[in-house]
Amino acid sequence: MILTKTEESRLLDSMAMKDYGIPEMVLMENAGSAIVRLTEDRVHWDGAFTVVVCGTGNNGGDGFVAARYAAGKGARVMVLLMGNEAHMSDASTLYKLVVEKMGIPVISIRTAEEGAPYIHDADIIVDALIGTGLSSEVKGEKAVLISLMNEAQGIIISADVPSGMITDTGKPAGVVVDADYTVALGSIKRGHVLYPGSSYTGGLLYSPIGIPEEARVDFPVRLVEREDIFNVLPVRNRVSHKGKNGFIGIFAGSDGMEGAALLAGQGALYAGGGKVAVVTTKKAASLLAGKIPELMVSSIGEGPCFSEKDCGAALEKAKAYDVIAIGPGLGRAEETQKFVKRLVMGWDKTILIDADGLYALKEQQVDLTKCPGRLILTPHVGEFAHLTGLSPAEVEKERIDGAIRFAVENHVVLVLKGAPTVTAMPDGRAWVNTTGNPGMATGGMGDTLTGIITALAGQGMNGSCAAMAGVYLHGLAGDLAAEKASVGYRASDLARLVPLARERVMEGK
């Protein structure tokens, strides 16, 4: 399922019409019918007083079609039309005429106040006022009309996008419809999943409106769905043994920050790592040993944190590992930064770098393109801001495109954590995650994700697939935890649910 910007949405429609010969009227018919069909099990149409608020763009045309289908479901329907009717397309004009011939009232309004009594009394409001073409702030009577919709008690269903939402960013153009449901048409839009657009969208439903899947092949940004993970997760057979499921090495922890190492190791175990070894400092190792019996704990060096002189021993240990992770709880001492640089520059397999490891990359000016290994970086917004020199606000403004640009320029897989998490690939593609919830905003979740992704890479998955699948499973485990308590579950609780999340994916649940 692709995730589009405004220009990409237009291109997709154009391809459907020009390359596949699908008339605009057919796309509009499919769109309008989907608005009603996809909400049938959520909204009671029969007998509901339904007000369809249309603009004069093609979004309004979708609304006219929806009015017809709503009437077919037994709704008492009327249409409010705001805007210059001379701007309506031939398809929209035709569907307006069809609605009028059916006896459905169509009232053209110049001021929001003219429509206020109808909106106030509506059981259902279909928002088809402004579509994806919005390029400036909504002002005047349209802004007032949107405010009236938001103040009404009726259920609001937005056609394609909530009116007033900027499609590419999800930000409001002054004022925006606060929808209960949005039916995305042809493609999911970036604004549907980026904050704050995700909060305006409400329950997100989707219809391909008849556009062939082949038309979507070359679009670079996609939403991760269960089927995507099902297709890449390794399946074990009867002759599988621990040696075939990866020997995972995790360089993590320091004196006083032992927990991060334990959480990363725990995440790797629950994600199915064949053998998991945590390498930490001497004191930390003494505290961690035996906490989780299945976790192999050892130490290098004598100090409270890793130093450059420990790198030889680290590289020697790493020879036995199939994949390594480095970063959680390391600390930011300069000697530790140098340790990270030498390890990253001296190891030629898959390596995941997180937390304090990311800090070291920036401070030691590591040229990622010259690292011999296959790198997976997993920063949150603050860490990515430090890596790039941008402000957190600038990172959020280009959450998807900025992640892709960094991954391409540095030849890495980049997992930009947050809402939503974006996994960007060095070939310019990106996957936007659909699982997870606010209850996961607590300490240790990132360390657990480090272990999960590293373990999946150790089971034979390439870095891109391991990152994409790890993020999805991590979020799904959080959703499973939230079924019992929406807030207050710990990273350890989530880790224990990763096997169940993996089972849900494989069973198609």
Image: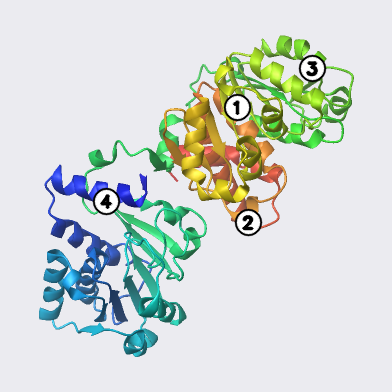
Choose the circle earlier in sequence order: 2 or 3.
3
Q: Between disc 3 and disc 4, whose residue precedes?
A: 4
Q: Which residue is drawn at 29% across and 65% down?
A: 35
> Residue at position x 35%, y 62% from top?
134
Q: How crowded is mark 1: few (under 14 residues within 10 Å), some or many (20 or more)?
A: many
The foreground one among 201 and 174 is: 174
What's the CA distance linking mark 1 and mark 3?
26 Å
Mark sitting earlier along the chain (4/2):
4
Q: Are marks 4 and 2 in contact (CB under 8 Å)?
A: no
Point out residue 342 in the picture as x, y percentages from the top left corner.
Answer: 71, 16
Quadrant of residue 497 within the rendered picture: top right
- The disc labelled 1 sits on which kind of residue? Ala
Residue occupied by mark 4? 10
* Residue in the image at 75% along x and 28% along y: 252
Which residue lies under the disc numbered 2? 484
Classify 10 Å Cα crowding around label 2: few (below 14), some (14-19), many (20 and above). few
**Residue type at tag 4:** Arg
Q: At which x and y percent is residue 116?
A: 36, 87
Q: Spatial distance from mark 4 to mark 2, Cα to Cα?
A: 42 Å
Disc 3 residue type (three-letter): Glu
Considering only vertical position in the picture, is 457 above or below 90? Answer: above
On screen, residue 95 above or below 432? below
Q: Which residue is drawn at 11% across and 74% down?
A: 98
| The quarter of the displayed image where residue 30 is located | bottom left
Q: Disc 1 versus disc 2: distance between alpha carbons? A: 27 Å
* Residue that numbered label 3 is attached to: 308
* Residue holding disc 1: 455
